[in-house]
Amino acid sequence: MNLEQYLPVLLFILVGIGVGVVPQVLGYVLGANKPDAEKNSPYECGFEAFEDARMKFDVRYYLVAILFILFDLEIAFFFPWAVAFKEIGLLGFWAGMSFLAILTVGFVYEWKKGALDWE
């Protein structure tokens, strides 16, 4: 086995490490490091923290966030479908329409169950 075949992979790894590490090292070495009381103070929206950082959030917050991510990612599948619309033909069109129908049924179901309501 010839090790010269692995030279591009080794160079790629070294360049990747260099791009990730060199700017951080340069920032640490060349950057000003003069901490004072204001820089070391806790920051939370411009005022001192008044509650425990481990306070509980309402479950609805997580539910709405997860549903948003879910539908956002599913909608992202329509971009490649739209770009390749002429090449995929009639079968691709109906596959996209069935995906859209399933997505719509799921959205209507969530809406009717009140998962998107915020009180």
Image (cartoon, rainbow, N blue to C red):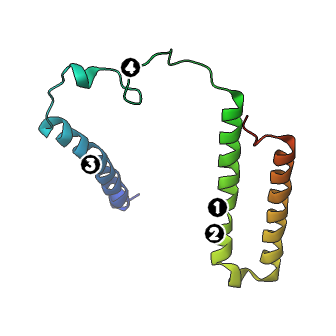
Q: Callout 1: helix, strand or loop?
A: helix
Looking at the rendered image, the quarter that the N terminus falls into is: bottom left
At a point 69% along the width and 40% down the height, the residue shown is 64
Q: Earlier in the sequence, mark 1 or mark 3?
A: 3
Residue 48 placement, left or right of 52: left
Counting from the top left corner in percent of width and height, residue 3 is at: 35, 56
Inspect the image, locate mark 3, and give the three-letter code of the amino acid beneath it: Gly
Mark 4 or 1, which is nearer the eye? 4
**Pointer 1 with pointer 2, Cβ within 8 A:** yes
* Left or right: residue 74 compared with residue 45: right
* Distance (Cα) linking label 4 and label 2: 44 Å
**Residue on which the image places disc 2:** 79
Q: Amino acid at mark 1?
A: Ala
Place residue 63 in its image quadrant.
top right
Q: Which residue matches tag 4?
A: 48
Foreground: 85 or 8? 85
Between discs 4 and 1, the one toward the N terminus: 4
The disc at residue 18 is 3
